[in-house]
Amino acid sequence: MSRLTDLIRQAKAKDSQLGADLEAEVRELQRRRSFGLVFERHQPEAVELPGVTVSVGAKVRVLPPRGEAVKGDQRLWRVIARDKKAGTVELVELVPAADAVAESRTQSAQDVVMVAEFDDRIFPGLVETGRVERGGDAPFHTVINGENFHALQMLTYTHRGTVDAIYIDPPYNTGAKDWKYNNNYVEGDDSYRHSKWLAFMERRLEVAKELLNPEDSVLIVTIDEKEYLRLGLLLEQVFPDARIQMVSSVINPKGATRSSSFGRTDEYIFFVMIGEASPAPLPIGDEWKVVRDARAGKLRWAELLRAGSNTKRADRPNQFYPVFLRQTDTGNVFDSVGESFYGDRIGSVAVPAGCVAVWPIRSDGSEGNWQINAQALRTSIAEGYVRLGRWREERTAISYLKRGEQAKVTAGVFPIVGRRDDNSIVVDDSTYVPSFVPGTQWRISTHNAEQGGTNLLKAMVPSHKFPYPKSLYAVEDALRFFVKDKPDAVILDFFSGSGTTVHAVMRLNKQDGGSRRSISVTNNEVGADEQKNLRADGLRQGDADWEQWGICDYITKPRIEAAITGNTPDGEPIKGDYKFTDEFPMADGFEQNAAFFTLTYESPMTIARNRAFERIAPLLWLRAGSTGPVLTDVYEDGWDVSDTYGVLTDSDSAPGFIAAVEERPGIGIVFIVTDEDTVFRSVARDLPEHVDTVRLYESYMHTFEINGGTA
């Protein structure tokens, strides 16, 4: 049901004529077509929060009795009273049916679950559920178990405008119970199926847009044929200033069977490039099947005579000058470079004795121009970056190295091993691997989802199954084009699933010693088939015996732990080797760190009274770069510091806190807990200039007050 339909129903309940009039007007509007992608927003989306304590004022649903596989009551209720002694809550129906009176009822507190709608204000926190540490002082990869829309809202406090890359593999909307909307699986025959998917994606992309660095970042989205057309239009609407390109990538060479259709071998990857973002040329192997210039593996000498555009003498008059050459007993050499000539007869220019003058004359006899000016050419000749072709007197060809090729020489990519008679350099190109930006059709063997995804995951967590994991190498390659030159990049995946993205980032770090850090958001959803069996056993969401089979606990965390340690969950060394780019035994693991958290929902009153600090503390740690420990023991001394950030909770302890911050030059941000603006300004004034200061809880509350109602 769309949000508009829902509002009309509420209007009818209060005024039947008003509701009927509104309904008639909406029908008329629906006959018209707007330009662009048109779809229902289906507000509000809602998420059940098992395990969250139900308090007075909370919005809840009533759960079905244990042992029953029927769908629970989908109505929303408000808790108006709670009897802790009896273990019951008093409920009132939030949106009664038309012409009906809101129902009231008493319910066991154990049989209701808190619900958050996406237009509700949420005040998020995090509870740490584990760590894996093998990376020393390296930053932590962060895995968050929670509803991804709310997790994205949380990240607007910690990472607004600072994320370098987002990689997501959202639900493909196959109609085969691959995703839920408002707690219900979206079936293939749902007439609102595509509209619901678009509403679902739009909300998340709008918040994700706030996280991306507007100067230079990329959003990468994978999809198949079910929604790629709509996704492309949606991306254009959400990111109107970005450059968007779609790649077709083969992930199953054998082809997935489609009834009455061609077998599906590929999927699509959208690259949404923001600001200055663009794919960097990479030294890619033969498996990319790039059509390469035969000269690509060598130092490229360009013709000094300008070709293409602006080739006439009049286009660059100061770059019309003679180059004087002469022959010696050992070979052809440069004598000198003349000055720019603006006269009518080049024959009037004096030529040094024993030399010939080479002018920028084109093959048709017309006067052209050289690619660089006379002084630049003199400098390049002296450095060995200009060479002569076969002697043809005044028609002798001259070539030179452009700045990019010169940079390869100075960087040692092409070591100088000698000089020719004309002083031009001779280089060793035997070990050079050329770099390329490939085309938009990828047929890469390591991107095979079975080999690089299913089989690799099976080796790491042998007894755990996950449907359709991405190829590790496919994710790694897609990211590498945009984070190659960003060793400290922040990479987000808010449809994390099995954890392939964090695994790929760890491989990228190992290859070049980078300190990139990933943030992965997943949930603990249990598969539809498993849910039936668990319900039959009297279990339901929130029970420990249910949650152990969820995606995060059963797949994501064990996979990341195995990747870092090199051991399966059973403690056995992982069998097999990593392939492509960096080949080594999987049992070696990675010298990386990872921390796991569960998203919590806090009350504004608890936060304002500073009684939720332990759950807010991980947000501060994330904002400071997710390095080292999370600072939670801040009350004994009134403050605490790590190597990267600090927290002050007692302004009377400010002198000691300021001294500690000054002793640690790596601290870049501090959080000052105070209700008084004058106290905050006083402390901030005495801190080192390079330190960013944030006031708690004013900044936190402001962020999530304005986030309310964004759905």
Image (cartoon, rainbow, N blue to C red):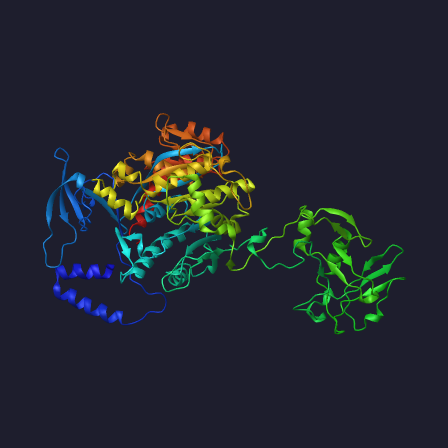
Total of numbered circles in the picture? 0
Does the image show residue 599? Answer: yes
Q: Is residue 233 left or right of residue 297?
A: left
| Viewer-proximal residue among 449 and 262 | 262
User: For the point 16% across and 64% down, which residue is it?
Assistant: 19
Q: Is residue 189 left or right of residue 264?
A: left
Q: Is residue 69 left or right of residue 159?
A: left
Quarter of the image where one finds residue 606:
top left
| Viewer-proximal residue among 537 and 618 | 537
Q: Is residue 660 left or right of residue 300?
A: left
Rendering coords of residue 193 (x, y %): 29, 60
| Viewer-proximal residue among 500 and 531 | 531
403 lies above or below 358: above
Rendering coords of residue 671 (x, y %): 39, 36
Quarter of the image where one finds residue 264:
bottom left
Does the image show residue 162? Answer: no
Of all residues, the one furthest to the top in this rendering is 636
Quadrant containing the N terminus is bottom left
